[in-house]
Amino acid sequence: MQVQHVREKDITWKEFKRYFERKYLTKRYYDRKMKGFFELKLDNKTIDEYERKFLELLKYVPFIKDESVKIYRYLSGLPPPIGDKIQYDDPKTMEETIRRATCLFEQQREKPTFRKAWDDQKKFKKEQRQKGNKPPFFRNSPQG
């Protein structure tokens, strides 16, 4: 292989990487990755997918060195109730932040939300009415 007239045996990995990036990875490529980093949101990804994507894109913004800025950016991609709760705890490292986010999401997944419980109850009552069952407070009424 020839890289700018340099023999394969005479080139180091670091030099090869620098040549490769200069030739094939344009400024536009890096700009798209950086934009993706700043627009990254959890949306319908799992928390693990979000974490992986965040850490992958973090490599393209080398000017972010401060841990608190990384943590803030990570939390800003999470839904506000989760991000705010973690930010209130004031984590000091990315590892701690990611661990807390994962724990909170696991807890959220295990407990039913109020809305889901309400919808389930409405669905159950509707099914009971369709079967002809009356709610308990109508069963003992003198008219029914």
Image (cartoon, rainbow, N blue to C red):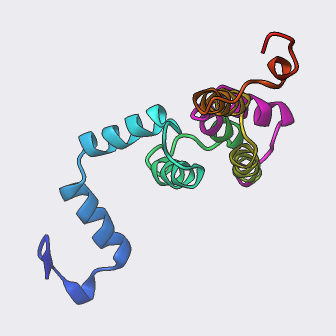
- Residue at x 88%, y 20% (from the top left corner): 140
- Side of 76 relative to 7 (left or right): right
Residue 120 in the magenta stretch? The answer is no
Residue drawn at (57%, 51%), measured in percent from left and top?
A: 51
Q: Residue furthest bottom?
A: 9
Residue 21 % position (x, y): 27, 59
Q: Main secondary structure of the magenta part?
A: helix
State which quadrant residue 86 falls in.
top right
Image x and y of residue 80, in percent? 66, 26
Count of numbered marks: 0
Between 47 and 62, the residue placed more toward the observer is 47
Front-lying residue, 129 or 39? 129
Magenta stretch: residue 84 in it?
A: yes
Q: Residue furthest top?
A: 143
Left or right, residue 72 beside residue 16: right
**Residue extending furthest front?**
143
Q: Is residue 1 above or below residue 126?
A: below
The spot of residue 144 in percent (x, y) is 78, 15
Check the image and report above or below for 10 versus 120: below
The x and y percentages for residue 20 are 24, 64
Q: Of residues 46 and 34, which is closer to you in this image?
A: 46
For the record, the magenta segment spans 73-95
Residue 74, located in which quarter of the rendered image? top right
Q: Is residue 129 above or below residue 12?
A: above
Quadrant in which the N terminus is drawn: bottom left
Q: 30 above or below 24?
A: above
Query: Residue 127 appears in which quarter of the rendering?
Result: top right
Name the residue: 48% across, 51% down: 53
